[in-house]
Image (cartoon, helix red, strand yellow):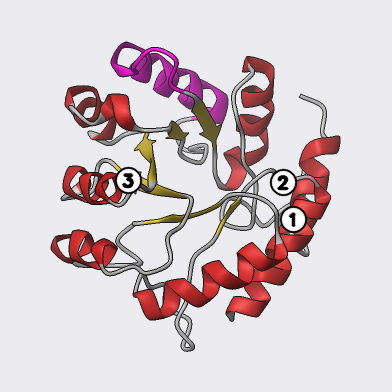
């Protein structure tokens, strides 16, 4: 969880073929944080280890009080390349505006089964985001709903509200991580994989690292 450990993991993932990294800066006790005292050393360590863009997220785990996030962002002295904003969370537009004021790239995280896509479609900031991240839920064994069906449904929901030319990164989680990654590749969309999304390799065995997941993703057949 230290900056050095995060940098080492990121470097291995990039060496395996990852083109960018997403990190969750953590305090010594393990909690995620966007404090400049926590963020700055993580960004410095990761940037020194990889030649790839570094992004973070503003989800509620990192800052439970959304009203404080814009102030927190204005206090950063070291800036990430890209920040993911969960558009369904309270204060998302104010957070995105604060990031844009600092010249930081914004990606809109639009989750299935939330009002995030509808809120994003109405937002005057939508044309300013660099990318949309479409997040689909894990398959539901009770209903039999598949991850691919959920992904297609989310993409169809997003399409009318996306500014022309907006790149889309599609990803799933848990049991849907690998099926959705394959679907993203078939559709020509950006994709991601990591321990945040799944702890298992395509054959169901436990992954030992983010790098191992990246290696498996590049070798996996869509």
Is residue 87 positioned above or below 32 on the image?
above
Residue 208 drawn in magenta: no
The residue located at (48%, 37%) in the rendering is: 140
- Specify the segment rendered in magenta: 144-166
| Residue 76 appears in the figure | yes
Residue 154 drawn in magenta: yes
| Residue 207 appears in the figure | no
Q: How far apart are the alpha carbons under marks 2 and 1?
A: 6 Å
Residue 86's label in the rendered image is 3
Residue tagged 1: 13
Residue 215's label in the rendered image is none
Q: Main secondary structure of the magenta part?
A: helix
Along the line of sight, the residue nearer the viewer: 160 or 152: 160
Is residue 94 positioned above or below 187 on the image?
below
The residue located at (22%, 33%) in the rendering is: 115
Along the line of sight, the residue nearer the viewer: 18 or 137: 18
The residue located at (82%, 50%) in the rendering is: 16
Q: Characterize the local packing of mark 3: few (<14), some (14-19) or many (20 or more) Cα atoms within 10 angstroms.
A: many
Quarter placement of the N terminus: bottom right
Residue tagged 2: 18
Q: Position of residue 156 (x, y in %)?
A: 40, 14
Report if the CB atoms under discs 2 and 1 are less than 8 Å apart. yes
Question: Going from the N terminus, do you reach mark 2 or mark 3 first?
Answer: 2
Question: Going from the N terminus, do you reach mark 3 or mark 1 first?
Answer: 1
Q: How far apart are the alpha carbons under marks 3 and 1?
A: 24 Å
* Mark 2 or mark 3, whichever is nearer to me: 2
Q: Where is residue 107 in the image (x, y as percent from the top left)?
A: 40, 39
Tag 3 secondary structure: strand
Tag 1 secondary structure: helix
């Amino acid at each position: 969880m230290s900056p050095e450990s995060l940098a080492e993991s990121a470097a291995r993932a990039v060496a395996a073929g990852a083109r960018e990294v997403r990190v969750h800066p953590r305090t010594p006790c393990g909690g995620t944080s966007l404090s400049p005292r926590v963020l700055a050393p993580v960004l410095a360590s990761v940037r020194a280890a990889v030649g790839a863009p570094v992004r973070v997220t503003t989800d509620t785990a990192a800052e439970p009080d959304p009203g404080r996030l814009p102030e927190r962002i204005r206090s950063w002295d070291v800036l990430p390349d890209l920040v993911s904003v969960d558009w369904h969370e309270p204060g998302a537009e104010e957070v995105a505006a604060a990031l844009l004021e600092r010249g930081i790239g914004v990606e809109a995280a639009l989750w299935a089964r939330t009002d995030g896509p509808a809120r994003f479609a109405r937002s005057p900031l939508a044309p300013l985001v660099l990318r949309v991240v479409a997040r689909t839920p894990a398959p539901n064994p009770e209903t039999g709903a598949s991850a691919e069906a959920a992904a297609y449904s989310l993409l169809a929901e997003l399409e009318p509200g996306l500014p022309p030319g907006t790149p889309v990164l599609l990803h799933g989680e848990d049991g849907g991580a690998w099926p959705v990654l394959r679907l993203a590749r078939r559709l020509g969309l950006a994709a991601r994989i990591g321990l945040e999304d799944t702890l298992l390799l395509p054959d169901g065995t436990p992954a030992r690292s983010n790098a191992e997941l990246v290696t498996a993703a590049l070798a996996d057949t869509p």
